[in-house]
Image (cartoon, rainbow, N blue to C red):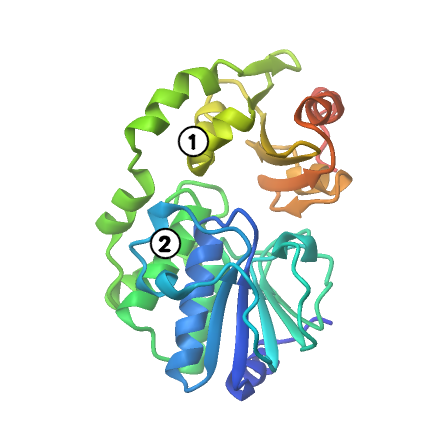
Amino acid sequence: MKIDAETLRKYAEETQCALVVGHISPDGDAVGSVLAFTEALRNRGAAADALFADRPDRKFEFLPVLRDAVNELPDKAYDTIFFLDLSTPDRAGDIAWPQAPVVNIDHHVSNPDYADALYLEPQAAATGEILTALFLDWGWEITPSMAQALYMAIATDCGFFSFPNTSARTLRMAAELLERGAQPPEISRAMDSLPPEALHAMGPIMSTLRTAADGRLNYIVMDEEAMALAGEYVDNYLMLARNVQGIELTIQFKYDRPDHTRISFRSQEYTDVSKLAAVFGGGGHIRAAGCTVDLPLAEAVAKVVPLAESWVRDGRSS
């Protein structure tokens, strides 16, 4: 059921014990939004736990609230569960959720309205942008640590203001966060830094790069060894492949388990990858989406690439 901002405010202000959940393989928007919302609830007197089924990457450890985030469901009763930046319920992880209303705050256009209450702004560049605007409208305090988390959430989901989803409001919200203590240089250093092992793995990983659809589609494959060595830095390899000249669609296949593969899609101009991901049970944004398939890595590649190639060749956007 879709709700408006005032109804969402009521949920947030009336909760006494909340669980705040981000998606698996949490990116900057998921991490920043969950941590900022958790802190906001605590600052208003509620008990709140931040949960990620997958432990966030080390690069996010400069955010202080992450230190007490959990990866397993605490043994306590919650009156509200907030799913943030979660386009589909399976993206929350394989967890038996307690009986409590689920409130979803999201910006993914592919969101199927699965929660008890959904606050959706598909025009927003990031869930962090939504939260920033809401906190300002509601008169909630944005502390320096919240500003840091929210700025990171926004900046990472719009390519540090270079992607087409960057709007005038996106920039206004970033400016508001700067005034409240966000530190862009610190955020950029944390997001861009790579350890030696990530660079050493770059050659073998990028050697898997293959091209199809007359040079308009490419994909990389990260097997079990690659994921163990440099899985924390998958986005770096994905962006390298995406930036190859002439590429419209990039796919990244990531080993998860012997019969389980995670897939990321990125497009440039016309391919709606949220709809392509939805074919395989996933979702996301028009230009960035993902899914998980119950197939071994090689079989996932064999199944997904031909369909993606046909979409690119046909110029499909739906």
Image quarter of residue 201: top left
Mark sitting earlier along the chain (2/1): 2
Q: Characterize the local packing of mark 1: few (<14), some (14-19) or many (20 or more) Cα atoms within 10 angstroms.
A: many
Q: In which quarter of the image is the C terminus?
A: top right
In the rendered structure, which amino acid carries the disc numbered 2? Met
Image quarter of residue 85: bottom right
Q: Is mark 1 on a helix, strand or loop?
A: helix
Please determine whether, in this image, residue 181 is positioned above or below residue 29: below
In the rendered structure, which amino acid carries the disc numbered 1? Ala
Q: Position of residue 30 (x, y in %)?
A: 49, 56
The total of numbered circles placed on residues is 2
Mark 2 vs mark 1: give the one in front: 1
Q: Name the residue under label 1.
A: 230
Q: Which residue is drawn at 74% across and 20% down?
A: 306
Q: Find residue 152 and name its label.
A: 2
Left or right relative to 197: residue 83: right
The reply to whether residue 33 is in sight is: yes
Q: Where is residue 35 in the image (x, y as percent from the top left)?
A: 42, 65
